[in-house]
Amino acid sequence: MLFVSPAFEARVTKDSLVFSAAHFITLGGGVCERLHGHNWRVDVVIAGDLDENHYVFDFLAIRDAAERIVQELDHHMLLPDRHPDIRVQTDDQASEVTVRFHDRRWVFPQDDCRILPVANTTAERLAEWIAGRLIDALELTGHPQVAELKVGVEENFGQWAWYRRRPAADARSSETKRG
Ligand SMILES: [Zn+2]
């Protein structure tokens, strides 16, 4: 299918879209980073046509939805639930999360953790996860003027990862699957 780039974009990035959180990722060859933190910054772009209000999307709605997601992550330990080698176990009775990678082990208070459905807590995977949450929160599949959502996550000064998705194409493909 031919996809023509939309002419308009609405972009929201603010100091309220910064969150402080800890993580560690694994690299190839069985290398596991030491636990460390970042002040992550989130940038949201919605591209598309103009609706009856002559905008692509309401800035405040984008801001509020993104802020809620960012606040869920702020001051937490970010852990991957789908990593092939990092095992994350929650002990509800002790309210603890035990994390293992080969012979290394970490134990965190459960309330301090955000266990995310990602394979590695890279900026790319965080951007993808945030994008999915924004599509749901803003009901983007129900807005035909929206062509594309882009989410950027800055993990360190000048180090951005971007994820982009076309919500309407998602809606079409899920209809095809259902049909
Ligand atoms: Zn890091």
Image (tube, helix red, strand yellow):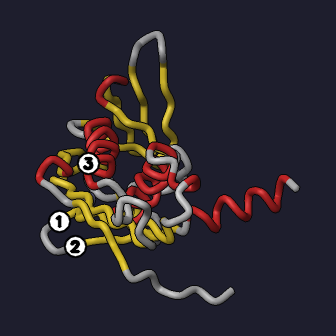
Q: Image quarter for residue 112?
A: top left
Q: Looking at the rendered structure, which numbered label has been put on residue 159?
A: 2
Local packing at callout 2 (Cα closer than 10 Å; few below 14, some 14-19, many 20+) is: few
Q: Position of residue 150 (x, y in %)?
A: 40, 68
Give the distance between the C-alpha atoms of the residues marked 2 and 3, in whole angstroms. 26 Å
**Residue occupying image coordinates x 28% and y 42%:** 64
Q: Are marks 2 and 3 in contact (CB under 8 Å)?
A: no
Q: Are marks 2 and 1 in contact (CB under 8 Å)?
A: yes
User: Does the beta carbon of the residue at mark 3 sit less than 8 Å from ligand 1?
Assistant: no
Residue to which mark 1 is pinned: 156
Q: Position of residue 114 (x, y in %)?
A: 38, 36
Along the viewing direction, whichever of 25 and 162 lies nearer the viewer: 162
Q: Nearer the viewer, mark 3 or mark 1?
A: 3
Q: Image quarter for residue 131?
A: bottom left
Give the distance between the C-alpha atoms of the residues marked 2 and 1, in whole angstroms. 5 Å
Q: Nearer the viewer, mark 2 or mark 3?
A: 3
**Residue occupying image coordinates x 34% and y 44%:** 65
Local packing at callout 1 (Cα closer than 10 Å; few below 14, some 14-19, many 20+) is: few
Pick the quarter of the image with the C terminus.
bottom right
Type of amino acid at the residue the image marks with label 3: Leu
